[in-house]
Amino acid sequence: MPNLLRCDLRLIVPLCLTAVSPLMARAETPAPEPEPSPSSNTDHAVPDFSMVDATAEESTTESSIGGQPTSPLRVTLAHEVSYKVEKPQYVVKNRSSLRVEYSKYVLDNFYVQLDGKATGFWGEDHRQDAEGEDFLVSQAYLQTSFGHTAIRAGFQSLPWGESILAPITDEVSPRDNRELFNFNLEELRIGQPMLVVDQFSGWGSVSMFFNPRASFNKSPERGTAYSFDRFRYRSEVGGETDLSEYGASWRKTFTRGDITFMTASLVDNDYALSMNEDGTVSRERARFSMNGFSFNYAFSDFVLRGEAAWKQDLPFNTAELQVVKRDAVDAYLGLEYQASATLTLSVEAINQHVSDWTSEVASAPRDSQSLLVSMTKLLMHEDLNIQVMNFYTQPGNSNLAILQTTYDWNDNLRFGFNVVYPYTRDEKAGLWNVRDQKQVAFKVQYQF
């Protein structure tokens, strides 16, 4: 019976999923924080809470562009095709999607946010036979405010942390791991029913969340291109019976940056697996706790980012596929350099350390490292965006090179072209099963 490494389960598909575009990933922010009162620009100014979500207000309410009101409804139509260029060659993706976003202030003090996407898989798409179509609602919540307090209730995804390499503190929202080369972190996070309360003051903002029933990462369906799981699972899921999750964060913004401390009790987004005597595998829900922090600091033409997390009672596997629990300490550091108005360079690194590691832990090494080097260049009056990324991880010496381009034909029409090149010679590496998945992808998107 070959060892099923925990690192393989997390990296065969998520390895590439987490190598997302820094521009997209960092465009997302945690719970929206109101802008300070115009009368003061100091760090200790008390924000104006007449409208809770300043970002949403700018983009979706009855603001005007060229004298015309902006619609709260945004519809995106897209078609995507990808082709595997290494033998055996075949079409991997051939799909169309409809995304509907709606965000609007109502009744003076309420804000509605909806975000749903429907995808249809055509003939040669690798998910057509297994799924046919897919429907996903990532955001559907109502937000209100009173005094210095804001409350959001409904389906939400909650981003934490700074790393785009791996979930260091970004452990709250599960992810959709059914695709190998999806580089949009916004699309990967899965919404969950949550109650989020934000309290703002001059000494910082406190955000608290409660999730009554945790969701789990979505894995590739059997028969799709990235399904390598040959286990027979028992239908019932065991382990933790209390699936509630809760946590809090405190964020303080300074002139040149910010710092956030966070703590949470969570249910692991991946099931823990254990082998039974009859050869079947049981899935178990496992609870762990996390304490961490993240920061941003800007100086000259640089931005320094970092985060670290201490995770207690994470599940790992022995060589016999039995569950053992260990603590882990994950750390991330990234440096971004704005070389010019159109050129950005960055380097990012993480180290994931298993505390009290012994040879009994077969599913993860004592330490694993990842490194991402990227360059983003804007051309043609910033309508053409070219991004080159190289993602390296060890042990296993896996390497993933990515070319990602978008061209805005006009305000509504966008074209995209991507190239991905995974490479490894190590059979234990997370990319081993997909080392031949060299692909080119084309996408056309119309938004109105």
Image: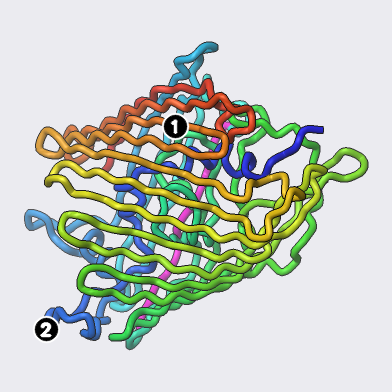
| Closer-to-camera residue (247/10) | 10
Residue of label 1: 400
Q: What colour-coding does the image apply?
A: rainbow
Q: Which quadrant of the structure image shows residue 142?
A: bottom left
Indicate the position of residue 275 as horizontal and vertical percent values: 83, 44
Residue of label 2: 39
> Disc count in the image?
2
In what quadrant of the picture does the N terminus appear?
A: top right
Dot 2 falls on a residue whose secondary structure is loop
Principal secondary structure, stretch drawn in magenta: strand
Indicate the position of residue 155 as horizontal and vertical percent values: 50, 62
Which numbered disc, 1 or 2, marks the residue that appears first in the sequence?
Answer: 2
Residue 293 in the image: above or below residue 443: below
Q: Does the magenta stretch include residue 290?
A: no
Q: Which quadrant of the structure image shows residue 357?
A: bottom right
Q: What stretch is highlighted in magenta?
A: 132-145
Residue displayed at 72% across by 53% down: 358
Q: Which residue lies furthest to the left in this view?
A: 66
Inspect the image, locate mark 1, and give the three-letter code of the amino acid beneath it: Leu
Residue displayed at 35% across by 53% down: 334
Q: How far apart are marks 1 and 2 (CA)?
A: 49 Å
Q: Does the magenta stretch include residue 138?
A: yes
Residue displayed at 64% across by 62% down: 327
Inspect the image, locate mark 2, and give the three-letter code of the amino acid beneath it: Ser
Residue displayed at 65% across by 46% down: 364
| Closer-to-camera residue (259/208) | 259
In what quadrant of the picture does the C terminus appear?
A: top left
